Image (cartoon, helix red, strand yellow):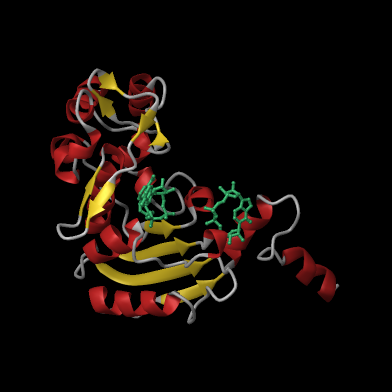
């Protein structure tokens, strides 16, 4: 099973909301969340269950700043810098308040011990399970709003594919981008073996972007802005962190 509900979920939610969000009434917003999740079988919750909740948390994404990601959770928010450089789903009101938390209902409020993993009905393309249903809704909404030049940062943790057709990015973000709003797409890859621009799963990504958006993306392997973050976060230089070597070779 997945982890149980985060201790003090209500206090964290309301505290984050008061601190950073534009929502007028944080207690009413928590009540809307509670209504969907508490005392409810988590596997009966779908993305549509959260419609009233997300209706309260309106947001708009700054033009040219939307950044999607997959397999790069650890780095993408250092790169986006809380919405200053890029704007990720976790920089939206709804994403910010819930990011990193866990939750599921039980017959008496919340289950703090464990949550069922949740599953996707592939025929109806619906996630069941309070947490993943929530992220399906949040991802879909975020993708529909993206405007102008959009970006995606792909990692390939554990030697897997950078672009996986089971990822939230592939299922709910790329297909929901609006062809008349998105004008260009930049793909940034944290390379790993064969996973780099023009090879591995990046070939399928280019095809899918052409298919959904009618655009040819620009693709960058380990661009400097990403390498700075990789270097900064590794005591010993990682394979992608080459600045020091380049400097010593040329001097
Ligand atoms: P990913 O595979 O790196 O997954 C990111 C996180 O989503 C994981 O760490 C996990 O918390 C959760 N997740 C995704 N699929 C899951 C599954 N099948 N079972 C359990 N947990 C799962 O990348 P992704 O799937 O492409 O998701 C990232 C994209 O979707 C981003 O662009 C973001 O906007 C959105 N998203 C964010 C979150 C989040 O927790 N902040 C969760 C899902 C989706
Ligand atoms: O998607 P990422 O891995 O973040 O990884 C992308 C690439 C990897 O291929 C790997 O080469 O970045 C590299 N990398 C690191 N250098 C690194 N240093 C610490 C990946 N993870 C690293 N960590 C830690 O491992 C972080 O705490 C991170 C976890 C694995 O992250 P993930 O599997 O998402 O949270």
- Residue ID at (21%, 31%): 41
Measured along the vertical axis of the image, is residue 124 above or below residue 247? above
In the figure, is residue 76 to the left or right of 120?
Answer: right
Measured along the vertical axis of the image, is residue 181 above or below residue 103? below
In the figure, is residue 199 to the left or right of 175?
Answer: right
- Residue lying farthest front? 1
Q: Quadrant of residue 201?
A: bottom left
Q: Position of residue 213 (x, y in %)?
A: 25, 74
- Residue lying farthest right? 251
Closer-to-camera residue (116/109): 116
Count of numbered marks = 0
Closer-to-camera residue (87/235): 235
- Residue ID at (48%, 82%): 198
Quadrant containing the N terminus is top left
Give the image quadrant in which the ligand numbered 2 is located.
Answer: bottom right
The answer to whether residue 146 of the structure is visible from this angle is no
The answer to whether residue 195 of the structure is visible from this angle is yes
Measured along the vertical axis of the image, is residue 17 above or below residue 234? above
Q: Position of residue 222 (x, y in %)?
A: 58, 68
- Residue ID at (56%, 64%): 159
Q: Position of residue 132 (x, y in %)?
A: 30, 44
Quadrant containing the C terminus is bottom right
Closer-to-camera residue (51/57): 51
Q: Position of residue 80 (x, y in %)?
A: 47, 51
Measured along the vertical axis of the image, is residue 166 above or below residue 136? below
């Amino acid at each position: 099973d997945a982890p149980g509900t985060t201790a003090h979920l209500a206090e964290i939610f309301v505290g984050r909301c008061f601190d950073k969000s534009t929502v007028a009434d944080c207690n009413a917003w928590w009540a809307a969340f509670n209504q969907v999740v508490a005392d409810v079988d988590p596997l009966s919750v779908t993305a549509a269950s959260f419609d009233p909740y997300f209706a309260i948390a309106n947001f708009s994404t700054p033009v040219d700043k939307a950044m999607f990601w997959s397999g790069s959770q650890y780095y993408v928010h250092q790169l986006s810098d809380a919405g200053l450089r890029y704007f990720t789903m976790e920089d939206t009101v709804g994403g910010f308040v819930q990011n990193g938390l866990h939750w599921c209902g039980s017959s008496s409020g919340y289950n703090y011990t464990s949550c069922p993993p949740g599953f996707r009905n592939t025929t109806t393309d619906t996630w069941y399970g309070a947490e993943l249903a929530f992220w399906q809704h949040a991802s879909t909404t975020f993708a529909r709003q993206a405007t102008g030049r959009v970006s995606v940062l792909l990692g390939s943790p554990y030697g897997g594919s950078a672009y996986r057709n089971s990822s939230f990015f592939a299922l709910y973000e790329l297909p929901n981008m609006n062809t008349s709003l998105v004008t260009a797409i930049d793909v940034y890859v944290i390379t790993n073996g064969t996973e780099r621009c023009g090879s591995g799963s990046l070939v399928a990504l280019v095809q899918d972007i052409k298919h959904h958006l009618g655009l040819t993306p620009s693709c960058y392997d380990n661009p400097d802005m990403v390498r700075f973050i990789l270097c900064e976060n590794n005591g010993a230089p990682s394979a992608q962190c080459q600045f020091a070597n380049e400097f010593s070779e040329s001097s």
